[in-house]
Image: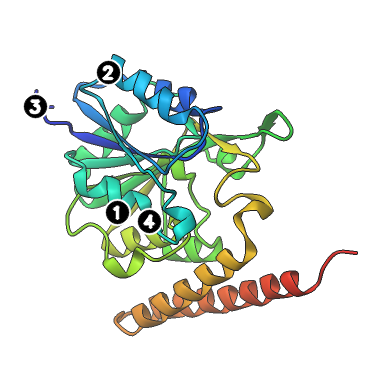
Amino acid sequence: MVDSDIPLVSISCLTYNHGKFLKEALDGFLIQKTDFPFEILIHDDASTDDTVQIILDYQKKYPDLIKPIFQEKNLWSQGTRALSATYNFPRAQGKYIAMCEGDDFWTDPYKLQKQVDFLENNPDYVACVHGAHFFDESLNSRVETKFEKVKEDFDLDLFKIFHESGGVYPSCSIMMRNTPPFYPKELLRFPSGDLTLIVFLKMKGKIRFMKGLWATYRIHANGVYQGENRGIKNIIKNRYLIQEYYSNLSKKLPKSSTRRLLFIFKVKNYLSIMYLKMKVLVKPT
């Protein structure tokens, strides 16, 4: 790597009332051993617990690394979506962007180095992801996931992405090339960005899944997209937006096989919407 003060990787972290977990996330960034500089971009969405103070304490210790934005009002509750794409991606100086929310954390000190090495040596790949352990706060224990069964690296394909509705990678594992214009404006309104982001990247190029378990993804009641707390109406809205976006996208794709995959996804998406609507209508007795 070329020695430079300009960060090669920009770490994008969103926080909201993550004080209980945030130190683990920040420590996971700081333990990274790399032969390149990186920066930590934090966007706090008006936390009401001790999250802000924790960020300020870490920023005081690492002023050249930690670069926060603090909102005075909670943007998510006001309908603003895609906070990473809106507030962190545009200020990212790095050639690559790595993502990790404030309730998850990295466990391998060479995670960034291994992902950068792969992307530097494979310019035809637009992103890479990896496995992670899952920790369920309600059980106070790790839970086994499909990622622990991955024995070798592989490339993500559209069929797998659509078949699993985007759940093919832990969100705290992704590293992608920062190549503006990075994110289409029409995607900024989606309540859930994981599926949208991975399909958008797959349309741009290849994505490698790396077999290592280099992070921990936390399952807890206050997660934005976890459990019933995320709100069924939000999920339905997101599903409709995805349906609309990929319907328009399929018209621009020349390959019939890709169109068939999009059709399969649209059918699965429609069934998911119907199920969620029924869940709203039928109250448990």
Q: Nearer the viewer, mark 3 or mark 1?
A: 1
Indicate the quadrant containing the C terminus: top left, top right, bottom left or bottom right. bottom right
Q: Which mark is residue 86?
A: 1
Residue at the spot of label 4: 82
The front one of 84 and 115 is 84
The front one of 157 and 40 is 40
Amino acid type at mark 4: Ala
Q: CA distance from mark 4 to mark 2?
A: 27 Å
Q: Pick whichever of labels 4 and 2 is earlier in the sequence.
A: 2
Amino acid type at mark 1: Thr
Q: Residue furthest front?
A: 72
Residues under numbered marks 2 and 1 in contact, where contact means CB atoms less than 8 Å apart? no
Residue at horizontal 85 percent and vertical 64 percent from the top = 284
Q: CA distance from mark 2 to mark 1?
A: 24 Å
In the rendered view, does 221 fall on the left or right side of 210? right
Label 4 CA crowd tier, 10 Å (few <14, some 14–19, many 20+):
some
Residues under numbered marks 3 and 4 in contact, where contact means CB atoms less than 8 Å apart? no
Q: Which mark is residue 109?
A: none
In the rendered view, does 248 fall on the left or right side of 160? left
Residue at horizontal 21 percent and vertical 42 percent from the top = 92
Q: CA distance from mark 3 to mark 4?
A: 32 Å
Q: Pick whichever of labels 3 and 4 is earlier in the sequence.
A: 3
Residue at the spot of label 3: 2
Q: Which mark is residue 62?
A: 2
Label 1 CA crowd tier, 10 Å (few <14, some 14–19, many 20+):
some
